[in-house]
Structures are given as structure tokens and as C-alpha cells.
Image (cartoon, helix red, strand yellow):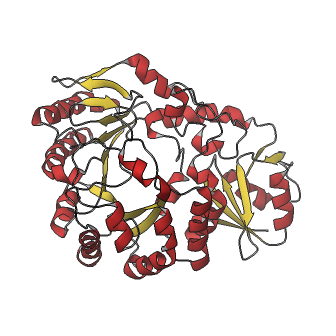
Amino acid sequence: MDYKYSKYNYCIPNKHGELLIYNSYSNRFVKIMGTKIGDIQKSIKNFERVSDLSSDEKDCLEQTGIIVPYIEDESDKLKIRYQEIVNNGTLAFTILPTEQCNFRCRYCNEPFIKKSMSKEIQDSLIKYLRINIHKYNRLDVAWFGGEPLLAADNIEYMTNSFLEICRAYRIPYTANITTNGYLLTEEMVRRMIKCHITSYQITVDGLESTHNFQKPLAGGGDTYNTVLTNLRNIRDHIKTKMIRIIIRTNITKEIYNQFDQYLDFYQKEFGDDERFSFFFRPAMDWGGETVKDFFDQLVDDDVMKEVYKKILDTEKLKRFDSHRGFFSLGGTVCAAAKLNYFTLEPDGKIHKCSQIFDDDFDTCIGKLSKDGKFIIDESKHAKWILERTSCDDRDCSFGGNCLSEFCPKLRINGIRKKNCPHEKKYIELIMQILDLDKNNYVIVNT
């Protein structure tokens, strides 16, 4: 059989002269070693027909998606992939047990209007799940806010019922939480572990001075030392290996100016604990009034590239589990583009987008009724899931992953342009960082 190099390949040599390849359709990472590196790199960039490879080499590269049958139409494959991703049988909730928060982060767009979810609404959601869970093959819950741990009792109450229902139907249940970490004491972690929350994303914005400036308490006051103490207690006293702590940092100009010290400090504190990983994003303008006084601290793509270069050069904080997760099956397809993904506000309103609720763009598609029904405006819902045209670049090498649907809000707003997700912008740097962990790459000797 004749083969060609896939249109969804990225390739770059690493500092050892080996060739790193990422295929965005198979989401596999391959490292080529040996004498054919130059020829393979040239062939990939020119989408050439495969030649001068042994049967074993072809087999390995075909299994990882680097080469495909010559007659294959790779664009057509994406139509099937899109259906697999958008309707994969998973029911996924992002639940805001409260919109209140004990922080007032300078880039936050939350209005902090709605209080904790009432027991009536919690019971309605439980009733919905009891009625409908038989339609799905798993339940994924993300606890969000506001600060969700302000409503820890709500999390426990709903989780107990979720677990009971999932056990009855033999449906897998997973849960994660995004928290500012201020209330995440050792006792609270143990409570959340009982709620089967295994993944914790905690934002730590740099070192003490920048974190306290960017993430002060709602009534004024510092937060850094409390969050850091909680992280250290998890490291030292929570022994289970079943949890994952993601330290997220929203990069600003001030954090970048201290980034060398940041790397040294967090490598020393958490670099030896494999449960801790690191996740970097630029601080963003998500709307609202607060961020308007913070514009001068926002960074561009060039600064973010320098952040990744520093990580690569120092080989510190090399556990990039969240970034690795993006390079999974449809890893950068927006969750809001998926059929059975819903965000629930404390008042029972149902949204698709989990980031923007109260702006001029109406993301609300329905509400939760008292008798446990989702009353959905199907016309609004359809706009989020029936197309994949957030991006007009149909020949993009990253299209096998994002499927041109990294932000359906852009599409619904009539914005169709090559406005690519961060992972594509930094793909070559992230490929090299992931190479620091040898388990990420399939080795092919030529």
C-alpha cells in the first residue's frame, strides 16, 4: 500500500538533533532517531508520498497517524471525529454551587450577585439526573464559581446523590474543582476526596507580591501565604496518589518579570511531588469593569512564548499535565460545543459557556424546572453544537485536534477568522517541553 505524510503533522528537531512529531488527529507524539531524520522532516513539510522506510517503520508511523494511506481524504475523517467528540455519551455538568467569592481578582468578570444554590434547585438537579442518567455512559462534574468551597456543604449534598445514582446504574463518575485555594485546608481536602474530587485547579499568580496584588481578599487583605500553606499541607499530609493538583498561573507583565525566581521557588516547593503539575495562561480580558484598570498588565503571545522558552531552557516545572490533556482526542474542542455539556448557575439557569454569563451575549439556553426537567430553547442550543466554523482555516495542521470549534461563541457572534487556540500558537515550544518527560513520545529508530 502507498502512504503519504498526514496533513496534521507538526515536526521540529529537539536540542539533541532528534525529530519530534505531533499529529493533531491521532494526538500522538513520535520521536524519530537515526539516519533518516532530515528526509522525514522534509517529506512531512512537503506532504510527500512515503518512500525509503522499512515495513516496521511504516507500521509504527501508520499506527501513530504520522502517515496515512495515499488515497485517504483526511478532511472527510474530521466529520466523523466531530460527531464522536460532540456526542460521546458523556453527561457533563459544570456546576456553580455559588456565585459568591472571597477574592476580588483584578481580571475577574464575575458579578457576584447570585448566592448559594438553594436546596430546592439542588434537589431538582438530582431529580433530573435520576430520571435521565440511563441515557449516558458516564457523568463528569466540574465544580466552579465564584468560589465553590464557600458552598462546600452543597457540593457534599449533591455528590452523595450523584454517587448513589451512578452506582445504581453502574455509570462511572468523575469530578474536579477550580478553586482559589484559600479554603482548601487539609480537612477540606479530605472532605472533597470523599466527594470523589480527584483534580484540583488552584490559581497561584506568581510570588507573594504579585499574587497578593492580583488576588486580594474581597474585603482587602493578602491571600498568598494562606494558599501556599494549604498547598504545602497537601504535599506533606495528604498521602493519597489519587489526586492531582494543578497550579495555574495567569501570566501578567509583573509575573513575567519575576519568572526566573518563580521557577526556582516552585521547583523547590513542588517539583519532586508528581501529583503537582503546572499550567500557564495569559491573564485575559473576559469583560466586566474590574479588568479595565488592569489592561497595562496583560501580555501578548510573544511574552507567553518567552515563558515557555524559560521552562524549556531551565527544565524546571516540566510536568505539564494540563497541556498534555489538550493534546488528547478533541482536547481543544470547546466543551460548550458538546451536545450533553451544560453549565448550571446557582439560580437554575442553564448555559453552554462556563466563562461568560452576564454580558450582552446571551449564553443562557434554558432553566432547570422544579420537577427535574431541563427546559431548553432548542434553537439556542443548536447554535452551539451544529456547526464547526469558529475558524476558517480548513487546512490548518492543528485542525485534527480543535476541529475548527475551539470557541463556538465566536461563530455565533459571526466572527470567523484564524483566531487559533493557545496550544497551536505555542505548539513547537510545548512539544519540546513535553519531550522533557520521555513517557510522552513513541520512539522510532530509523
Pick the front one: 142 or 268: 268
Q: Residue at x 24, y 33 (%)?
A: 129
Image quadrant for the C terminus? bottom right
Q: Splitting the image into 4 quarters, where does residue 64 fall?
A: bottom right
Residue 138 at x, y = what percent? 35, 41
Residue 301 x/y as whole percent: 60, 56
Q: Is residue 380 left or right of 165 when viewed as pictured?
A: right
Task: Please state the horizontal and vertical placement of residue 23, each as a whole percent of the image.
Answer: 67, 52
Q: Nearer the viewer, residue 67 or 244?
A: 244
Q: Is residue 417 something that shows in the picture?
A: yes
**Residue at position x 80%, y 58% from top?**
55
Quarter of the image with the N terminus in it = top right
Residue ID at (37%, 40%)? 354
Q: Is residue 176 above or below residue 88?
A: below
Furthest toward the left, the residue is 119
> 53 or 307, which lies in front?
307
Q: With 214 as the anchor, is 311 left or right in this view?
A: right
Q: Viewed as shown, does residue 139 lie left or right of 441? A: left
Taking the spot 71% from the left edge, 58% from the top edge, the residue there is 60
Picture layout, residue 113 above or below residue 378:
below
Report how many numbered discs are placed on residues in the image: 0
Q: Is residue 203 visible?
A: no
Q: Is residue 361 left or right of residue 85?
A: left
Q: Which corner quadrant of the image does residue 91 belong to?
A: top left
Q: Which one is nearer the viewer's eye here, 68 or 252? A: 252
Position of residue 316 relative to residue 321, above or below, is below
